[in-house]
């Protein structure tokens, strides 16, 4: 605990911006540049940072991703998050440009929308769409055998469920959220990193969702989707406690 930097006495500004994580990251970068946060110093815990900045914990996670990918911090297994030794030509692209919506914010909104969409789909899904989902889950298993596995089948699975809700607004929103994820520099870089750490989409959870849809049970479908997205969030967050 002795190495943990207490930010309570420093002047931090409550964040009020669309890209909250970038504003948090910029403030922390400024403290590093001014040598208020020194190389080797440990950052406070996620919950403490969220309280001090007045933002959510997902926002803090995304700020840490931006700082890590920029080489300003290092996540050490079982120890914490530390300031690195700055390098003269360090890449700060993620802090100099809008890097898109972060992965945890996207998961948060997907949790809200897709859980109810899945419940609605359970009452409206067609036999043909059930057959499509079965094939897509098989495709997911094949994709996972590849060294450079993509998540195209995963995206197709969620898109088919959104279509099965028979509400064009839901379908458009779900497809748009995947576009946001795929176009976000922060999200794509982080997802590639956690895949390399062995964190992949759970095929068994997709099969549970499929089973609930086959039973045309909206409550089971809602819970199955909610559990899947909660687990995806928790698994991604283990990157900070590896």
Image (cartoon, rainbow, N blue to C red):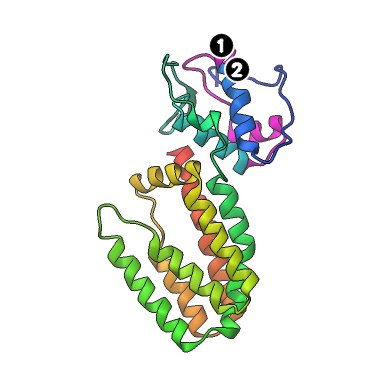
Disc on res. 35:
1
Residue 217 location (% of width, % of height): 57, 82
**Callout 1 secondary element:** loop
In front of the other: 143 or 194: 143
Query: Can you say whether 57 is above or below 5 in the image?
Result: below
Magenta-highlighted stretch: main secondary structure? loop
Kindly identify which residue carries mark 2.
31
Task: Specify start and end residues of the magenta stretch as a single range.
Answer: 33-57
Residue 28 drawn at (x, y percent) = 59, 24
Q: Residues within 10 Å of mark 1 (few under 14, many from 20)?
A: few
How far apart are labels 1 and 2 at the CA level?
A: 6 Å
The quarter of the image holding the N terminus is: top right
Does the rendering let one see residue 116?
no
Q: Is residue 175 above or below residue 166?
A: above
The answer to which of 48 and 69 lies nearer the viewer is: 69
Residue drawn where x is 66% and y is 21% of the image: 7
- Judging depth in this view, the residue of 65 and 171 nearest the camera is 171
Q: Quadrant of residue 173?
A: bottom right
Q: Answer with the quarter of the image where residue 88 lies.
A: top left
Q: Nearer the viewer, residue 182 or 138?
A: 182
Q: Which percent across, then down, holds residue 106?
A: 57, 52
| Whole-percent x, y for residue 199 in the image | 39, 51
């Amino acid at each position: 605990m002795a190495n943990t930097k207490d930010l309570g006495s420093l002047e931090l500004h409550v964040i009020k911006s669309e890209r909250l994580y970038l504003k948090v990251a910029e403030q922390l970068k400024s403290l590093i540049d001014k040598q208020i946060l020194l190389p080797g110093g440990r950052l406070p815990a996620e919950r403490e940072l969220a309280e001090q900045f007045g933002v959510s914990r997902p926002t803090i996670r995304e700020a840490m991703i931006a700082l890590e990918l920029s080489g300003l911090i290092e996540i050490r297994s079982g120890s914490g998050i530390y300031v690195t030794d700055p390098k003269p030509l360090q890449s700060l692209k993620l802090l100099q440009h809008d890097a898109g919506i972060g992965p945890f914010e996207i998961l948060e909104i997907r949790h809200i929308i897709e859980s109810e969409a899945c419940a609605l789909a359970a009452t409206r899904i067609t036999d043909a769409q059930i057959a499509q989902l079965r094939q897509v889950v098989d495709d997911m298993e094949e994709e996972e055998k590849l060294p450079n596995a993509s998540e195209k089948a995963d995206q197709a699975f969620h898109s088919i469920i959104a279509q099965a809700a028979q509400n064009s607004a839901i379908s458009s929103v779900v497809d748009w959220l995947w576009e946001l994820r795929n176009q976000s520099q922060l999200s794509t870089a982080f997802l590639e990193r956690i895949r390399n750490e062995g964190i992949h989409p759970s095929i068994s959870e997709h099969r549970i969702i499929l089973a609930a849809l086959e039973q045309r049970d909206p409550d089971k479908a809602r819970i199955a989707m909610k559990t899947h997205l909660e687990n995806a969030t928790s698994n991604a967050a283990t990157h900070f406690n590896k």
